[in-house]
Image: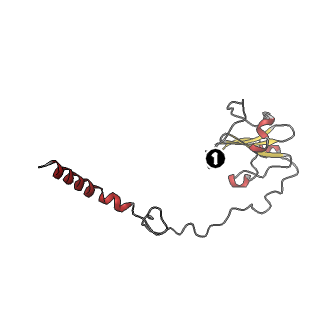
Amino acid sequence: MPLASRISFLAALALAASAPALAQHEEHPGGGRPEAHGEPHAGPTHYQRVTEPAHWNERPATVDRTHYQHNYQAARVYHIGVYHRPHGWVAHRWVYGQILPRVYWAPPYIIADYWLFALDVPPVGFEWVRDDTDAILVNVSTGEILQVEYGVFG
């Protein structure tokens, strides 16, 4: 077979092999790539935004310490995002009665929407804060830990 015929044959073979790939990238109205074919997805139905429960912020004015002084294992785990420990601090397993350093109950760690995580309404002067996977109920005047829920966050 002469050289020109071989080149023509190889060119025809290469063109035939690439035809399916060329067909997949053809131009479409509006330009761009073709849309994937499949069943249309309607999205969620009957979705309602989570709202605060009634009386969510009616905090008890008095504190029955015996009601709160517990270290619990959470009944459910919530995945809400990455936790960044305060700079320079290491992991610690806190228990009620200990004093939580002020850096741990700074605004970035306060759990303002505690009802979403099945946490009790904090009494006046207390806040829920996050430390890694745990939720800690802390007195925001003294730093005293009143309750700990281990493993609330995954």
Q: Position of residue 7 (x, y in %)?
A: 20, 50
Q: Is residue 146 above or below residue 41?
A: above
What residue is at 67 percent from the left and 32 percent from the top? 91
Q: Quadrant of the C terminus?
A: top right
Query: Could you classify mark 1 by the number of other residues whose Cα lies within 10 Å: few (under 14), some (14-19), or many (20 or more)?
Result: few
Say what secondary structure mark 1 lies in: loop
Q: What is the quadrant of residue 115 in the picture? A: bottom right
Q: What is the quadrant of residue 134 in the picture? A: top right
Q: Is residue 24 above or below residue 81?
A: below
* Relative to 35, 93 lies left or right: right
The amino acid on which the numbered mark 1 sits, given as a three-letter code, is: Gly
Q: Position of residue 34 (x, y in %)?
A: 43, 64
Q: Position of residue 74 (x, y in %)?
A: 65, 46
Q: Which residue is at the front of the view, 44 or 62? A: 44
Task: Report the number of numbered marks.
Answer: 1
How is the protein colored in the picture?
secondary structure
Q: Which residue is at the front of the view, 38 or 68? A: 38
Q: Is residue 85 above or below residue 118?
A: above
What residue is at 72 percent from the left and 62 percent from the top? 51
What residue is at 19 percent from the left and 53 percent from the top? 9
Q: What is the quadrant of residue 52 in the picture? A: bottom right
Q: Which residue is mark 1?
A: 81
What residue is at 72 percent from the left and 32 percent from the top? 87
Q: Is residue 100 above or below residue 61?
A: above
* Relative to 78, 1 lies left or right: left
Q: Position of residue 113 (x, y in %)?
A: 74, 53
